[in-house]
Amino acid sequence: MSQEKSVGIVAPQRFRFNEPIALKSGAQLPGFELVYETYGTLNAARSNAVLVCHALSGGHHVAGTYADDPKNVGWWDNLVGPGKPLDTDKFFVVGVNNLGGCFGSTGPLSINPQTGKHYGADFPLVTVEDWVAAHARLADHLGVDTWAAVIGGSLGGMQALEWSLQFPDRIRHAIVIASAPKLSAQNIAFNEVARQAILSDPDFHGGHYAEHGVVPARGLRLARMVGHITYLSDSQMGEKFGRQLRHGEHKFSYDVDFEIESYLRYQGDKFAGFFDANTYLMTTKALDYFDPAFNYDGNLAAALARAKARFLVASFSTDWRFSPARSREIVFALLHNRRHVAYAEIDCDAGHDSFLLDDAHYHAVLRAYLENISV
Amino acid sequence: MTYEKPRGTPRNPLTAKERERFDFAVIANWIPPGERVLDLGCGDGRLLRYLRETKDVDGYGVEIDDESVLACIRNGVDVIQIDIERGLSGFESQSFNHVIISQALQAMRATERILTEMLRVAEEAVISFPNFAYRANREAITGGHMPVSEDLPYEWYDTPNVRFFTIVDFEALCEKLGIEIRERLAFDVFGQPVADDPNLNGSLAFYRLGRKA
């Protein structure tokens, strides 16, 4: 095994797609831009490209750092790089900010050419299917006919699954981590609380807050706080914070008493400082709507019949947002269709967020699977 | 195409590696080419790999152990990490031709449930296990010790085995569960087939099982 290294200094790229795109909602965008990063080199056979799909809060900056912002390390830097499990000496790795995102791809923060103002709430709702359709345009632009693999965790895993359904001949391997074939009522309920937090913020202004020169930071902060609780496990939260008191005594006020309160407030503030509320709203709806079995009377096996890719499915023992049982639904639907699938249920106490960590066994599983992919 | 079974000689018991190849060859003889096969407790997937290479089977393995799952993935074997002890509920009925449990049934607790489930998900089950009533094992007990042999290579304090049974015991359980024994083979530690009193002379037992009509 060669030594693990960082991909080093990277720079995002941008491409404008001038063909209109018809969205699942029925709306249409006249064209759009995607911001992306690439790591490694596309080989002559164009057979070594891997698409990394991001989850709710991620973006195109998957690995490495920026020359003018060395502390801004990519969100999956522990996985992607020379000698790392997703080895950029072997693979040409692509990270992309999804359509509707807030890190530079066309989205609610962009200027609507028809009005000359920010789209804001007028940006159409986009779905997982729409993201994949947009990814395919990027693949065309990059000269990638077929991805060696599409990989993602959580909502990113749904995109990898959707890739195998929408473009079965353009993806050889789907790596679906800490994901689910659709949200449960409980999952949707948490998303609805997050949305209501944003929608009821007086600074939301029906989604046109940019015109008022404000952001619904309080709503976004609350949304992130409730979301964050679902990303962690009870045991891990107990271990990390327990009932530790900030000031060593009960203050009998609504300021921070317990350390967990401080932590959630910090996470909420941090998130509200860089994420767009409209993108957050839209992304939670994309999660809620994702359900490939919807048009098959809820029969997931029938929905997955058209997939041809080989699959690696992985889940984490303490993930209660997308529990291992949700991953097993995907596995058994693939099994019904006699598709190649390996399934690892990883013992890790960090809950849903485990997929972002570098647990040794988890990374060994990914490394083993990725090493066997021929390029 | 026939597959040569490795044979020990009466003087030299099979080595661990030979035993494994022997086990695989006996099982493979019962698996027609191109079948759909499920291997329970598949370890690092080497039996499935063998069956894929020699019989072109469409195979999946089930394993609970992390290191074994990792090894399967390394070996390019389709492995599903679940706990067999909790049943095979995700597997559809009659979705496999053969389900195999090679040298692993004695290490599982939910024996009846597993046997019943095996014949739910597959048309036939193939099982191999060490016969605890083998002559040398009886002699060990008579001599005051738990048996340790090529086929039972563990001390009592570190054995993964939790169910200790004999050919006669196993057949009684099959009767109770309405399981039909379609074929039985027994071998001694030299890999020689045993016809006479297999419960005494057989160290390893192999069964091909089905549901009674």
Image: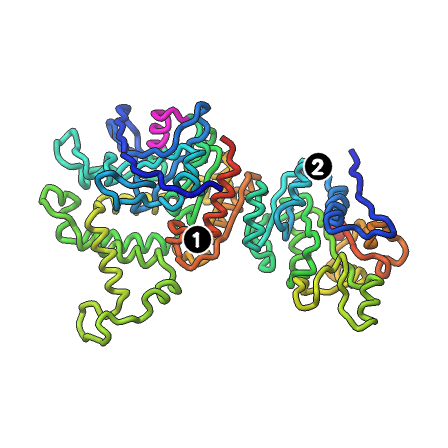
As drawn, is B98 to the left or to the right of A368? right
Residue at 26% over, 38% down: A100
Disc 1, SS: loop
Judge left or right: residue A39 versus residue A198: right
Secondary structure of the residue carrying tag 2 is helix
Quote the CA–CA distance across marks 2 and 1.
37 Å
- A294 or B118, which is in the foreground? B118
Seen from the viewer's position, the closer of residues A259 and B121 is A259
The residue identified by callout 2 is B54
* Crowd rating for badge 2 (residues with CA inside 10 Å; few <14, some 14–19, many 20+): some
Q: Residues within 10 Å of mark 1 (few under 14, many from 20)?
A: some
Q: How is the image coloured?
A: rainbow
A176 vs A219, nearest the viewer = A176
Q: Is residue A361 visible?
A: yes
User: Most extreme residue toward the left, as rendered?
Assistant: A212
Q: Closer to the camera: disc 2 or disc 1?
A: 1
Residue A64 is situated, as x and y percent measured from the top left of the image, at 32, 40
In the rendered structure, find residue A101 and report the number of the disc placed on it. none
Q: Residue at x 76, y 57 (%)?
A: B150
Q: Is residue A138 magenta?
A: yes
The kind of residue tagged 2 is Thr
The numbered mark 2 sits on a residue in which chain? Answer: B
User: In the image, what residue occupies the spot 23% across and 51% down?
Assistant: A271
Q: Quadrant of residue B153?
A: bottom right
- Kindly identify the amino acid type of the residue bearing the numbered disc 1: Asp
Q: What segment is highlighted magenta in the picture?
A: A133-144
| Residue on which disc 1 sits | A359
Whether residue B213 is visible to the viewer of this picture, yes or no, is no
Q: Most prominent secondary structure in the magenta stretch?
A: helix
Q: Are marks 2 and 1 in contact (CB under 8 Å)?
A: no
